[in-house]
Image (spheres, helix red, strand yellow):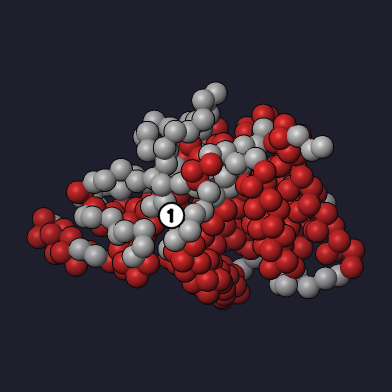
């Protein structure tokens, strides 16, 4: 009989092993690098949903009847349509900049695949880390700071975390994330194979970090953004709500924003604040999409008056 302790120890290593196996098979059999990520997405979903049922971190974080409609809207629009459009637009813009404005280097072509993969993950996390961190500052006297938080706040609306809640993300958030993730990598000349492997890593770890699983991650907490580490990021206790890395925690460790504790997170979600107006209801999908643009005109006028 498979014990819960065994599943807890297996959860993250098993997922990472599966991801790397798919990467290896893709290269060996020359599978399409554009299609395989969708296959990875489905496998990651099935894998994490199995563990969410067998070893849930919190039973009340499970998706209940009546909540599925909101999760499905975000899955179909924010992740499938807008996310794909955002990533495509970001990469297309990067290719244009690379070809006509910046150019590329052959730096990354001079090292082996394994080292290139490790380095690409490290470099690829740098700009997303800072974008994520800046999005949480939310200085109400600055238009850009306020806007970044209002865009990102949609991701923090849910008061529970599970696989589905990873998809609660604004399209602009997806675009900026993709642009920041791949900008330096493309300019440094990393190969399509390395970028593919980085993307597979991103899919698996990003979804695992939000999963409602009681995973025993131990030393992995000091390398990857594990469920435990990212659960703290969503905490309603501000001193716990650090950890701005999306895949790796290295930049959190370097810049002093890493948080870990023996105790688990207690409550996640948003703290009500009049500074940004009333946050949209979890059922109001359209309101969530429009939220970043509410009161921006008035705020711009105020800034102009002060200037």
> Residue 295, how many percent across, how many down?
20, 63
Of 210 and 200, nearer the camera is 210
Q: Position of residue 231 (x, y in %)?
A: 51, 40
Q: Residue furthest top?
A: 262
Left or right of residue 20, residue 149 in this image: left
Identify which residue, 125 or 75, lies in the foreground: 75
Q: Is residue 41 left or right of residue 299?
A: right
Residue 303 visible within the image = yes
Instruction: Write the residue at 11% across / 55% down.
Output: 306
Task: Please say if 1 is above or below 22.
Answer: above
Provide residue 41's location: percent of width, then percent of height: 67, 62
Q: Is residue 89 above or below residue 281?
A: below
Q: Quadrant of residue 36?
A: bottom right
Which residue is rendered at x = 44% and y = 33% of the image?
266
Secondary-structure class at tag 1? helix
Quadrant where the image shows the N terminus: top right
User: Which quarter of the image is occupied by the C terminus?
Assistant: bottom left
Q: Is residue 260 above or below residue 75?
A: above
The front one of 123 and 246 is 246
Is 7 drawn above or below residue 157 in the view shown?
above
Q: Where is residue 255? Give x, y as percent.
A: 49, 34
Residue on which disc 1 sits: 155
- Name the residue rendered at 49%, 43% in the picture: 60
Local crowd size for mark 1, using a 10 Å CA cut-off: few (<14), some (14–19), many (≥20): some
Q: Residue at x 65, y 40 (%)?
A: 55
């Amino acid at each position: 009989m498979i014990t819960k302790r065994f599943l807890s120890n297996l959860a993250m290593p098993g997922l990472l092993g599966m991801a790397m196996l798919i990467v290896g098979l893709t290269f060996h059999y020359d599978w399409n690098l554009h299609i395989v990520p969708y296959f990875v997405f489905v496998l990651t979903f099935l894998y994490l949903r199995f563990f969410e049922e067998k070893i849930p971190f919190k039973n009340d974080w499970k998706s209940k009847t009546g909540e599925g409609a909101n999760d499905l809207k975000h899955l179909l629009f924010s992740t499938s349509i807008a996310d794909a459009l955002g990533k495509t637009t970001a990469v297309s813009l990067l290719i244009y900049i690379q070809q006509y404005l910046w150019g590329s280097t052959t730096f990354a072509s001079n090292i082996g695949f394994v080292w290139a993969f490790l380095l690409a993950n490290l470099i690829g996390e740098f700009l997303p880390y800072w974008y994520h961190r800046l999005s949480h500052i939310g200085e109400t006297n600055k238009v850009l700071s306020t806007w970044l938080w209002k865009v990102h706040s949609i991701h923090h609306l849910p008061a529970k975390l599970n696989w589905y809640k990873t998809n609660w993300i604004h399209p602009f958030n997806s675009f900026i994330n993709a642009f920041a993730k791949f900008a330096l990598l493309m300019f440094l000349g990393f190969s399509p194979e390395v970028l593919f492997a980085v993307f597979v890593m991103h899919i698996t770890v990003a979804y695992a970090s939000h999963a409602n699983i009681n995973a025993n991650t131990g030393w992995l907490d000091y390398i990857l953004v594990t469920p435990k580490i990212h659960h703290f990021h969503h905490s309603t206790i501000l001193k716990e709500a650090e950890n701005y890395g999306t895949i790796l925690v290295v930049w959190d460790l370097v810049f002093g924003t890493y948080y870990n504790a023996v105790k688990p997170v207690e409550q996640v979600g948003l703290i009500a604040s009049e500074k940004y107006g009333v946050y949209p209801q979890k059922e109001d999908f359209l309101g969530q999409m429009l939220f970043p643009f509410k009161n921006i005109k008035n705020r711009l006028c105020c800034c102009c008056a002060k200037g």
